[in-house]
Amino acid sequence: MIPETDEHLDAVLIGGREERQIVIVEYDRKWSARFDELDLAIRDAVGDVALSVEHIGSTSVPGLSAKPIIDVLLTVADVGDEDSYLAKLESAGFVLRVREAGHVLMRTPEKDVHIHVVSPDNPAVANYLDFRDWLRVDEMDRTLYTTVKKGLAAQKWTDMNYYAEAKTDVVSEILSRARMWRAGRKVRQE
């Protein structure tokens, strides 16, 4: 993970840095249905270019408090081949927000949906899915993550990316348990 700096953000953010209040709300069952709508819209827009479309982030974990922003992981064969997906997603109403090596982020104009576009070999894919799947089964880490997020949300951030970076230590801690859990599941399945 690249530590966020104003210089880095200025290089990758389309439209510049944004100071936004971070609001954490209780889990809403409507988030799952909203993702289902987005899944269809994304697949309709990009067709077979979509190798997978996954609901990730806190809104994908029942019972977890979250920012009311639906995070979507879209894998495409080559994230660098923007001609295969970018204009199609823009035609479907999504706006380019981040362009960096190995990762493109699109969002809705309302800023309530983030689509992370990556190639399937990007390590972020396993991280997102392991983290999500572990939080779905482990109540203690859901509670830990909620506590940290609420504490950080009470602070003022000059850009939401700094809030995300401030969660790095707890995310790494939880992700290490998620990886051990995932490895144990694979061993039992073999």
Image (tube, grey):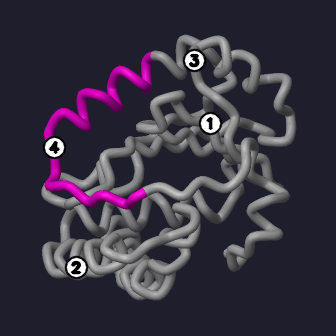
The type of residue carrying mark 3 is Gly
Looking at the image, is mark 3 or mark 4 earlier in the sequence? 4
From the viewer's perspective, tell me whether residue 180 is left or right of residue 19: left
Residue 134 rendering spot, x and y as whole percentages: 30, 68
The type of residue carrying mark 1 is Met
Vertical position of residue 72 compared to residue 65: above or below: above
Quadrant showing the N terminus: bottom right
> In which quadrant of the rendered view does residue 14 lie?
top right
The type of residue carrying mark 4 is Asp
Confirm whether the magenta stretch covers residue 26: yes
The type of residue carrying mark 2 is Thr
* Residue at 43% from the left image edge and 18% from the top image edge: 40
Quadrant showing the C terminus: bottom left
Looking at the image, is mark 1 or mark 3 earlier in the sequence? 3
Q: Is label 4 in a helix, a strand or a loop? A: loop
**Which residue bears the numbered disc 1?**
106
Marks 2,1: beta carbons within 8 A: no
**Which residue bears the numbered disc 3?**
93
Marks 2,3: beta carbons within 8 A: no
* Residue at 43% from the left image edge and 25% from the top image edge: 39
Q: Nearer the viewer, residue 97 or 48?
A: 97
In three-dimensional space, the C-alpha distance between marks 2 and 3, rounded to whole angstroms, equals 34 Å
Q: Which mark is residue 28?
A: 4
Provide the residue span drawn in magenta: 21-40
In three-dimensional space, the C-alpha distance between marks 1 and 3, rounded to whole angstroms, equals 10 Å
Label 2 CA crowd tier, 10 Å (few <14, some 14–19, many 20+): few
Marks 4,1: beta carbons within 8 A: no
Q: Is label 3 in a helix, a strand or a loop? A: loop
Looking at the image, is mark 2 or mark 3 earlier in the sequence? 3
Q: Is label 1 in a helix, a strand or a loop? A: strand
